[in-house]
Image: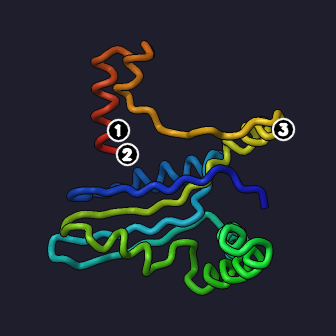
């Protein structure tokens, strides 16, 4: 199972009024094989404090188990060498099968439990499928990642890539979205 770079997005929404646009965009990106949603957990707490949860993934049950085994193996390798890697793979696969996704409800809930009323939050684990060929080309050339960061639109002014007014608009959009 080839896996691309993975990113965790934690997104909040005040006074949410969802119209399906976010799910539609995730579906478009998935259909074009640009991303794959490994796991997603969304929580909405209404004005009365009632909580709704929604889970989703683009992975089949078998792929979820494989991904859980890979994550478990990496954690086990770091903690206990080769023997820990084998134990971690088994535990990771079993854990994913038991909870029906990558996110552990209990730990994910810790992140999302403190959201205020009339607010929603989402944890989305995204695989960047578009980056697999690039990553592989870098590896074949002997390269390795030194850093990976999102750049603020305001920093783009210093590089001369955008004008100040455009950067302010982009910054406002970033602050409101991610």
Looking at this rendering, what residue extends furthest in the left direction?
A: 48
Residue at the (71%, 56%) spot, across then down: 3
Label 1 neighbourhood size at 10 Å, few (<14), some (14-19), many (20+)? Answer: few
Residue at the (37%, 55%) spot, across then down: 11
Q: Secondary structure at mark 2?
A: loop
Label 3 neighbourhood size at 10 Å, few (<14), some (14-19), many (20+)? Answer: few
Task: Answer yes or no: is residue 158 visible.
Answer: yes
Residue at the (62%, 48%) spot, across then down: 128
Of the image marks 1 and 3, the number of the one nearer the N terminus: 3
Of the image marks 2 and 3, the number of the one nearer the N terminus: 3
Task: Answer yes or no: is residue 31 visible.
Answer: no
Question: Answer yes or no: do the residues labelled 2 and 3 have beta carbons within 8 Å?
Answer: no
Looking at this rendering, what residue extends furthest in the right direction?
A: 140
Residue at the (77%, 56%) spot, across then down: 2
Please state which of residues 162 and 73 is positioned toward the viewer in this rendering: 73
- Which of pointers 2 and 3 indicates the residue nearer the eye? 3
> Which x, y percent locates residue 83?
78, 78
Question: Answer yes or no: do the residues labelled 2 and 1 have beta carbons within 8 Å?
Answer: yes
Determine which residue is flagged by label 1. Answer: 174
Q: Quadrant of the N terminus?
A: bottom right
Q: Which numbered tag is attached to residue 178?
A: 2
Q: Secondary structure at mark 3?
A: helix
Please state which of residues 178 and 110 is positioned toward the viewer in this rendering: 110
> Which x, y percent locates residue 43?
35, 70
Vertical arrangement, residue 8 with respect to residue 151, above or below: below
- 3 displayed left or right of 38: right
Vertical arrangement, residue 25 with respect to residue 95, above or below: above
Determine which residue is flagged by label 3. Answer: 140
What's the CA distance linking mark 2 and mark 3?
33 Å
């Amino acid at each position: 199972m080839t896996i691309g770079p993975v990113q965790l997005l934690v997104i909040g929404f005040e006074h949410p009024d969802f119209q399906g646009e976010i799910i539609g965009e995730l579906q478009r990106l998935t259909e074009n094989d640009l991303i794959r949603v490994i796991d997603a957990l969304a929580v909405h707490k209404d004005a009365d404090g009632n909580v709704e949860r929604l889970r989703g993934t683009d992975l089949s049950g078998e792929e979820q188990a494989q991904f859980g085994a890979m994550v478990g193996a990496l954690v086990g390798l770091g903690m206990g060498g080769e023997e820990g890697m084998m134990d971690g793979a088994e535990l990771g696969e079993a854990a994913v099968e038991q909870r029906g996704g990558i996110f552990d409800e209990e730990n994910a809930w810790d992140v999302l439990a403190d959201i205020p009323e009339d607010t929603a939050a989402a944890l989305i684990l995204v695989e960047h499928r578009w980056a697999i060929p690039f990553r592989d080309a870098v590896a074949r050339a002997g390269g390795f990642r030194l850093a990976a960061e999102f750049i603020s639109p305001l920093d783009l002014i210093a590089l001369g890539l955008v004008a100040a007014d455009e950067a302010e608009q982009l910054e406002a959009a970033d602050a409101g979205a991610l």
